Structures are given as C-alpha cells and as structure tokens.
Amino acid sequence: MVQQTVQGPSAAYAKEMERLSAKESLLVAFRDAGGFEALVTGKTTNLQRIDVNERIVSLERLNPTPRPTTSPYLEGKWKFEWFESGSLGLATARFLFERFPPELANLSKLDVVIKDLYASIAASLKLLNSIESGFMISSKLTVEGPLRMKQEFIDGLLESPKVDEESIPEQLRVAFSQATNALQQLPVPIRDAVAGGFKIPLGGSFERFFMISYLDDEILIIRDAAGVPEVLTRLDPGPSPLAEPMTEYVS
C-alpha cells in the first residue's frame, strides 16, 4: 500500500514557524551587526553584511503577501533597519551624518511614513546633545504591478533646530544667547520663514523604481532596480488583518 503525503494544517503550521524563525534570525543579525549607528558610520564588517543578506534572502522566499503593493500592511510608520551601498536610505543617512564629526552630531533614526500612496522619509539629527533638527523628503508612490512601485520625489524640508538650553555646553551659551537675540530682531516674515524650516522643491526631478520582496505586519523589505535591499520594521500597531486592500493597479 502506497502512503500519500497530505498537505494540511500541519504543513501550513510548519511553514509559518519557519517564517517566524527567519524573522527573528534577521532581527538578531541586525543587533549583532551593531545596529543603525554601525551601519551609518560604516563600522559594519563584510562578514556581518553577508550574514544579514543571507538572512534577508531566507526571509524573502517565505513572503506571506502575494500582492504587497496593494496590501493594507504597506501603510504605516516604518523604521530603517538595514540598507546597502547605493540605497536611498543609506544615501540620505550618510549625507546628513558625514557633514558633522561624530562627537558633534548623532543621526539617531531614519523613518518613513506611507499613507495614501505618499511616502515621507524623516531623519533626526542631534548636535552637541542639545540641538535637534530634522530633514524630511516627501514622495509620491505609483503602483505598477503586484510587486513593483515607482517613487517620485516632490520636495525636501530642513526643519528649524529645537534647542534644549539646559544641555548646552557652558562655553557655547554666550554664542547661543547672541544668536537667539539676533533672530528675534529679524522682521516677522523672515523670522516666521526660519521657524517654519527651509523647503527644497524637487519637482519630480528624481525618481526610482523598487520591488517589494517581503511584507507582513512587522517587516518590509524592498529592492531597488539594482537589487539593493532595504529592510524596515514597523513602528505603529499597523492595520487589522481584515482591512480592505489598497486601490488595485491597472495593467
């Protein structure tokens, strides 16, 4: 008698356990590689990079979302955990980080909010442990298939610094007081413009295509046209599994 193998609940359960294990393994690899700061400052070793990339590939093959570009899971607030040379995340992070010595500035995080096919990438920078500033890039997303999207960049905004006066070093307090007084003497329209930040129009002059290779309620993995991966983890609770899908693309 020939015994047949039946693919039932036990097989589905085993695959789900494999996926959850692969997720946990990837998160552990991020921590072992030194986290966000080591990645941005270039301290991540080649061995750590290949280890993380191996785990990324292992998780991608277990993607539970067949049409991620129209999935409700795509919307929400995400944190960049990993990016490689050539990626938008790494370019943004290093552009900000390398303009200040590490003892003066610290790029603490790089997040993105996706809502109604718009994405806003926000970087937080802290100077001298007392002056906080941010940089935001707004972009429009277009669904081009079940896995592929186009991203068109609209504008950038350099936010006005926010100062924690109590943490300013003693030797800089006189200079800070003089700068504050000078700002208060500016005409109101100029002062309001400075307070509102500096906007940089991009006018759709820069765009890119990317593919979503993995998406669930906690992790998002995308690859650009060159295949470079970016891994993000969710910061907000996320949508209900029963939520309606986003608008479908037209082929």
Image (cartoon, rainbow, N blue to C red):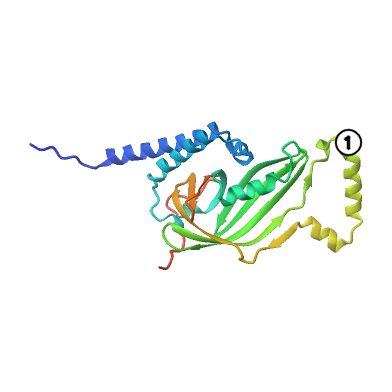
Is residue 244 something that shows in the picture? Answer: no
Amino acid at dot 1: Gln
Q: Residue at the top extreme?
A: 32
Q: Where residue 129 sits: x, y (%)?
A: 76, 38
The kind of secondary structure element at disc 1 is helix
- Horizontal side of 68 relative to 31 (left or right) equals left
Q: How crowded is mark 1: few (under 14 residues within 10 Å), some or many (20 or more)?
A: few
Q: Where residue 231 sits: x, y (%)?
A: 51, 45
Q: Name the residue under label 1.
A: 171
- Count of marks overlaid on the render: 1
Quadrant in which the N terminus is drawn: top left
- Horizontal side of 152 relative to 130 (left or right) equals left
Q: Which residue is drawn at 74% across and 43% down?
A: 100
Q: Where residue 218 sits: x, y (%)?
A: 49, 44
Vertical relation: 156 (above or below) 86: below
The part of the image, by quadrant, that contains residue 249 is bottom left
Using the image as rendered, state which of residue 223 and residue 77 is in the foreground: 223
The part of the image, by quadrant, that contains residue 243 is bottom left
The part of the image, by quadrant, that contains residue 11 is top left
Q: Residue at the left extreme?
A: 1
Q: Residue at x 73, y 53 (%)?
A: 159
Is residue 42 something that shows in the picture? Answer: yes
Q: Residue at x 52, y 36 (%)?
A: 46
Q: Where residue 3 sits: x, y (%)?
A: 13, 37
- Horizontal side of 26 relative to 159 (left or right) equals left
Vertical relation: 34 (above or below) 188: above
Quadrant in which the C terminus is drawn: bottom left
